Amino acid sequence: MANRQTQLMTEARARGTINTTKLAGIIHGGDEIVRLRREAWSRVEAATGASETSKLPVQYALASREDLYREGLQEGKAAQDDMKRYHHTFFDVFTPRYRLSNYSPFGLTTWLIKPTLEHMATQEQKKRFQNPDWNWAYAQTELGHGTFVRGLETTASFDQARDAFVIHSPTTTSSKYWPGSLAFSASHAVVMARLLIGERDHGIHAFVVQLRDADGSLMQGIELGDIGLKSSYNQNDNGYARFDHVSIPRDNMLMARSQVSKNGIYSTLAAHPKAAYSTMLVGRVGVAQSAAFQLAQATTIAIRYSVVREQGTPAFGIQSNEVPVMHYKSQQYRLLTSLANAYAIHFATRHAEEMVKDFERRQAGGDYSTMANVHVVTAGIKAWATSVGFDGAADARKACGGHGYLSMSGLPEVVDAMDALCTLEGDNIVMFQQVARHLMKIMEGNKVDPNDSMRHTCEPIYSASQNLLDSTTQKNLFKHRATNLARRAFNSLQKSQAVGKSKSDAWNEHAMLLISAAKAHFSSIVLDQFASQIDILDAGREREVLRHLQSLFALAQITSPLSPDTASFFGPGLLHESEMEVVHQQTNVLLDTLVPEAVALTDAWDFSDASLASAIGMKDGNAYERLMSWTKQLPMNVEAAERGGMLKDVWERYIQPKAKL
Amino acid sequence: MANRQTQLMTEARARGTINTTKLAGIIHGGDEIVRLRREAWSRVEAATGASETSKLPVQYALASREDLYREGLQEGKAAQDDMKRYHHTFFDVFTPRYRLSNYSPFGLTTWLIKPTLEHMATQEQKKRFQNPDWNWAYAQTELGHGTFVRGLETTASFDQARDAFVIHSPTTTSSKYWPGSLAFSASHAVVMARLLIGERDHGIHAFVVQLRDADGSLMQGIELGDIGLKSSYNQNDNGYARFDHVSIPRDNMLMARSQVSKNGIYSTLAAHPKAAYSTMLVGRVGVAQSAAFQLAQATTIAIRYSVVREQGTPAFGIQSNEVPVMHYKSQQYRLLTSLANAYAIHFATRHAEEMVKDFERRQAGGDYSTMANVHVVTAGIKAWATSVGFDGAADARKACGGHGYLSMSGLPEVVDAMDALCTLEGDNIVMFQQVARHLMKIMEGNKVDPNDSMRHTCEPIYSASQNLLDSTTQKNLFKHRATNLARRAFNSLQKSQAVGKSKSDAWNEHAMLLISAAKAHFSSIVLDQFASQIDILDAGREREVLRHLQSLFALAQITSPLSPDTASFFGPGLLHESEMEVVHQQTNVLLDTLVPEAVALTDAWDFSDASLASAIGMKDGNAYERLMSWTKQLPMNVEAAERGGMLKDVWERYIQPKAKL
């Protein structure tokens, strides 16, 4: 039924001049894929009951620790079943709600285990372990140890008499802690543990440990449990594990790279020590992709709501009617720059994905020459995309005021899920430091692959007072700025070492400069890749509008309160401070061009209403009616309504005796 | 029992040279207050069971919508009872966990209703309505209407025959939505509604509506319910209300400012139309204070954890042992700059608080001359403190890696609660625009109170190349920068109007510049006030260290990735870009001085362990043992343990049939 809000939405959508179907094809890689995706989503949403958007989504009704886990089991199983039945991989990296697949208790198997076995198991082991009946956990991190693998304490002691390894948790801090699916969902785990043969410590190796029997009961000596509520990802039973001298067959150590023989002889095979590396690379690109989609979800909800939410009258204006908040420039700026970021990240990850694929092809032939470069690009894009994504999603939440703070808006969950992305698969600060390390090598003039993606960023070619809406000008400016920051960090390192500081101390001293340089390089790389993905599109309105988004992306890096280190865009060979005014003017012109396209630009991501699970952000714009309808369906309200609209025990215990003391 | 972590904490604490007791007195306003606070907290924590920190806090065990509400009732009641019994006001603004008092279903009465009745009720009404048995809601916002009061739709129609008003919700969007305590806890509400007398609309007025009988049952024609889970503040039953022609006595309209007579004559009394204004002013200062304490909580947890968390080895270092993450400069920078922000905000709010008190004194004598200034200062400090607070808390979460993402770390809840502060009691973007409006008036040379806090910020006096560790130099730099930004915005407005744009369009066009200027002014004001609070302290190590914090605060405004618009610190009469290096060097020197004091600087806030509710951030540093102990107490684990360590129905329904298709 049409009402004020649906009418506002219809009008706003009609203002768009782009073909959203065409743009959806560009985003998703072809019209056929768009069609197949829609079908897959529809089937899964029908299976879980999510497609009935008039019904309160289950996650807002039942939100205890255990309820959320069960929701994850249900959605995860529906997605897994659909992939098997219809032979696709849409839910390999993302869940149907665009969270990373480790949001589901079934996601780890494809996400981490498949590639681990691929690279680390022998042929015989692959056959034995690739059992479709098993559900896996990847047990690496411990209570006291994160991504620094060398610090792990869990031991795997060789027991020659029994031709076995004994897996053991010697301390509290050695308890495995955090692995997804570990608490109650996994039957088996890859356990990273310190290999001990006699007195000798051979470092960290991977072992396959059966956790539970076919009927789910715990294997001898194993203690498992949940680690409780997290900011998000409560659909997964991230868990802890303690091993009390658990014996596993010797040939459960993954032996493609190193082996232990029957009589305890340890040998390393010829394989490159980083053979399993591509698992991590693929993982990080997936995280960046997920950041793009989730940021797009948050801006889609916020833009749609801003189109129908009428609030306040313009300052100094003559009209007394309230206007949609999308009227306000500050709202336009916040939401459209975040939307531009989502597009930029999405297109930039394509490049990273191709680099990883190229690396995998080379790796198969024993060529590891591009590894350092691919490592840096995936680490950097992961860190950059998730930092920017989190900030943008958190800002989108704020841009929706009170209603954005409601779980039913869908925004809190997106923000909290984005937050996780900044930490998992490599902490962002650590990732930026690894990028910086590579940059400093380049500055030192170390031998670097001539095709290295960073290399060309060290040749300044921007000259001031050019047209900032020109793609080449933008790219040159960003490169020059990034180079300046790398040089600043490099010179600081040199100076510190010149006065006698160790390389280690110098590095630590200038960590913030190094991180800043790394971020700037990825601003530049994302811009480059976004631009070149636009370059190859057919001419047309969609390309024009994407080019405007590219310009908005670039200018927002210079002006946005969310952008770090904006000062570094100014200086000799860069922008002059007097140009700031031009930047602001051009930003306003871009916003005027893009605001009419805003709804179309969100529609093009092709999010189903069910995948957004937002009372205020669905496609029809019917925000208030839906929010009120969902509100009335909340269990506490339904329950109270059955009892005359009150919670009797609450009243009698807490409210009535209020003043009696 | 001592272990590695408690030992690391003891060592870190011993490095401090300040007297934490003395500093606690400075923070809280005297040693006696510190003592009284401790006693109050201890009593309330004993009453709720929170003081047993070996036990899993209830909010991590029972986290359904209804569980959290009950937790709020329990803690809220304990705090209210303690204040009554021991005659103090410690929990008027904050809950025992430093959330705003509207976190509890009892907090609204003191927070909003007491001052509303004070300013808007007649003497007779005060007597009638200040009933200690009643629990109140303040029902202003509606589903379709936020802080723009003029847009409210709820009607109060005068019914002369019955000498009554009829309260009614004519549309879906007119449903009251969001008021705290409204769903199940409140017996009465102040309802803001449009006064209609015959055909005439007299605008929004306040009406007292009884919602429930003494036994808690709903009054005729009233529908109430909960609005479901929010990002945080789930301890309060924020609710919705629909009124179906609810009749209330005529003298339930609050009549101190305007009246409706028996025969329907509307009259306005002599009182200043903004008589109720100080409610809002006090509220905003309270929000800023809460932001300071919650940011301090987040940094306390993160710093304590960083002291005991050993992770990784320094880059290029020779040692192979892992080091506490507090060793890393990036960690030091992130956490100490946020701690400095917490101190700065806390001390700056004292000034705002005094301004409000002064305004209230004047108001009592009919003097409203300082109102505009007090309004701007409270709006600005609220927006600035909560923006900076949220960013810092979110960054502290990230600085704690995976464990910071666990609910049991206490950090997610602080971050989410801080997020709310950016929206409630005046959206930050709206607040900054109001500040900007005042700034532009000053730029226009409008007549402004000579004591106006903003006024002097328009006289640039910084000259470059001075010592940035000097307090006066810092203050001048910040003022000059703020003035530049105000002038930039002003000139842009002028130019747009010169080419024929309306004032309203020009204002909207340059909204981002105006917001930026407003933020810069509050950076400057917070620095000023922080500095002057330090100026008046007795000489001593505490003052020295606070002065270092002030310098770190100032320099971080120039360099931090979290600081907006850092470019504006550079330019003629400001910093030269070559000085950036000096800023970085001085920052590092400050960090070297402050890191040994870090634990002491968090101890000085005197947070009880129970109020932090953090497994990883308690005073003893015993992070891992406590986290593991709490984990084992999680209900899902206890339940599973009773059943052989598995969830049988989960296994049979979801895991076993995994591959069967």
Image (spheres, coloured by chain):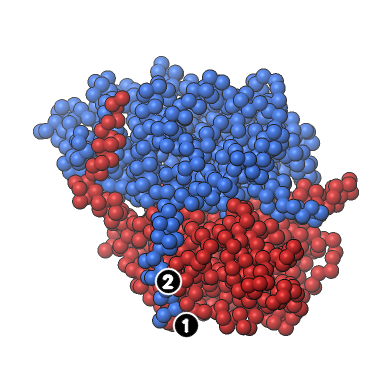
Chain colours: A red, B blue
Chain letter belonging to callout 1: A
Name the image quarter holding residue A115: bottom right
Mark 1 is surrounded, within 10 Å at the Cα level, by few (under 14), some (14 to 19) or many (20 or more) other residues, namely: few
- Judging from the image, what secondary structure is the residue with disc 1 in? loop
Number of callouts in the render?
2
Mark 2 is surrounded, within 10 Å at the Cα level, by few (under 14), some (14 to 19) or many (20 or more) other residues, namely: few
Residue B33 visible to an observer of this rendering:
yes
Give the residue displayed 36% in from the left and 37% down from the top.
B74
Give the residue displayed 22% in from the left and 50% down from the top.
A641
Give the residue displayed 38% in from the left and 59% down from the top.
A67
Left or right side of A369 for A205: left
Disc 2 designates what residue?
Answer: A215
**Above or below A532: residue B311:** above
Chain letter belonging to callout 2: A
Residue A525 coordinates in the image, percent (x, y): 68, 65
Q: Amino acid at mark 1?
A: His
**Above or below B366: residue A420:** below
Left or right side of B616 for B323: right
Query: B318 or A635, which lies in front?
Result: B318
Disc 1 designates what residue?
Answer: A87
Q: Residue furthest top?
A: B365
Between circles 1 and 2, the one closer to the viewer is 2
Query: A352 or B627, which lies in front?
Result: B627
Residue B187 coordinates in the image, percent (x, y): 25, 35
Q: Amino acid at mark 2?
A: Asp
Residue B150 visible to an observer of this rendering:
no
Name the image quarter holding residue A158: bottom right
